[in-house]
Amino acid sequence: MSYRLFGAETSAYSTKMRSYLTYKSFAFDWIPRTQDTEDEIKRVSRFATLPVLVTDTGYAVHDTTPLIEALEADRPEPSATPADPALGFLACVLEEYADSWLAKAVFHYRWGRKKDQKIAAQRAIEEYFTQSPPEDRKASEDRAIETMTGQLKLMQVDGDLGDVVEKSFKKFVKLLDDHLRKHLFIFGDRPSIADFAIAGQLIQMLKDPTPAKIIEKDGEFVAKWCEFMSAPTASGPFAALDDLKETLAPIFADDLAAFFLPWAAENLESSLAGAETFSVTLGKDAIQLAPLRSAARSFRELRRKFVAGQTVEALKAFTDAAGATVYLLRPQRQEQPPAPAPSADDGEEPVAGEVSADDETAAAPREDGEGVRRKRRRRRSGRGRGEGASTAEGSSADDASGEDASDEDGSSESSAVEAVAEAADDQSVAEDSAPAGDETPAEDRA
């Protein structure tokens, strides 16, 4: 089984996925988004987001979290998921923290200051126009800046939350550096899903002057770890939680439980209630925000995992001590609103207005629900695999025979990725008629 990974050097999630595939020794071709590959990316993509992982049967998957979970299940070694249930859940929390919270810091620093804006725009133009540069380079850079700074409001980092994100980031760099001085990776001697997600964001920040100075000043070991995470290798097993607590607990207590978790919990509750705004205290700052529904969906899934694992004594003791448990359990309400009738496509309670297939980026316009159903039926009957991608286009020269490509491991991996693709279709059907709520834009838009 071989893959094609379409992405961009400016995309934290592309960096995350590429680093993971490299660590697991998956065969894949890295295809950066440029003027030469733009049309192909649009043809194979299911949504207007990056990265896009395409199987040799033409299935395209965007959402890195369920994709990595599926690949982990089908190729367990070298593992990126701690077998210890407490560590496994904490890794999921840190992955969500990176994808939903650190992503805001990346966007805020990159597009919130003129010096960073200019350098980011220059870099984006250089990476996209690889063959023939634009006639008016400055005009292209100015358009890039105008487009991306216009997204600061949608990311909610154009006001008070931007200041809060900076405080959180500066604290996190110091805490993570303290931890990495004692441990090669976050959970011991091998990288976890948390390492890939966090490094993906921080590697981007090392490219931008303002956050890079913060990391260079307070994160000497963080910077070295980011270099190593481009192509990491395991040097031993995951550690025991007791051996990590001394420096891992402050990350959760002083940063996540002070900033990220209160925001994520209130954001979810307000989304479920259909509220237009909510108030929350992050650190010492009381701010008011509109709910971000795609972030609510991913945090709701994290809560489900905690409910399933909270009977693990070590996990509950850790989250209690960090002040995190209160945010990971849904608060009891005196009056619960009537439960919505389940739809034919989604037995779970939908988050109102959810339209994003991946919390990482803006969603593309979708077809009506019946159109998606028709495509899904064609896929399941063996027709129309992918969105315009054919099997031949995804095959390598080594797989020319077709038969040889269907070895046991490759078939299993393909099935896992295709299952994630089908799940994305199932999710989209339930959301097709939903009003456009928050969109989470970034460099990860295809």
Image: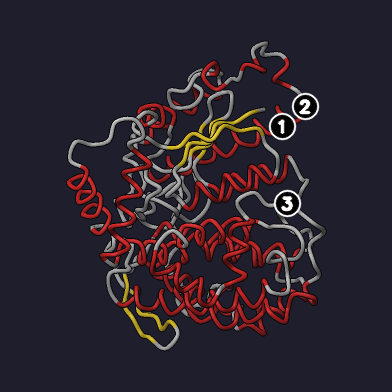
Residue at the image position 31 percent from the left and 56 percent from the top: 437
Residue at the image position 29 percent from the left and 31 percent from the top: 132
C-alpha span from label 3 to label 1 = 24 Å
Amino acid of disc 2: Glu
Q: Position of residue 36 (x, y in %)?
A: 37, 28
Q: Quadrant of the N terminus?
A: top right
Element on which disc 1 rests: helix
Q: Are marks 3 and 1 in contact (CB under 8 Å)?
A: no
Closer-to-camera residue (141/305)? 141
Q: Are marks 2 and 1 in contact (CB under 8 Å)?
A: yes
Q: Position of residue 240 (x, y in %)?
A: 81, 70
Q: Position of residue 271 (x, y in %)?
A: 39, 65
Task: State whether residue 325 is above or below residue 363.
Answer: below
Which residue lies under the disc numbered 3? 233
Closer-to-camera residue (150/225)? 225
Q: Are marks 2 and 3 in contact (CB under 8 Å)?
A: no
Amino acid of disc 3: Thr
**Disc sitting over residue 408 in the figure:** 2
Residue 351 quadrant: bottom left
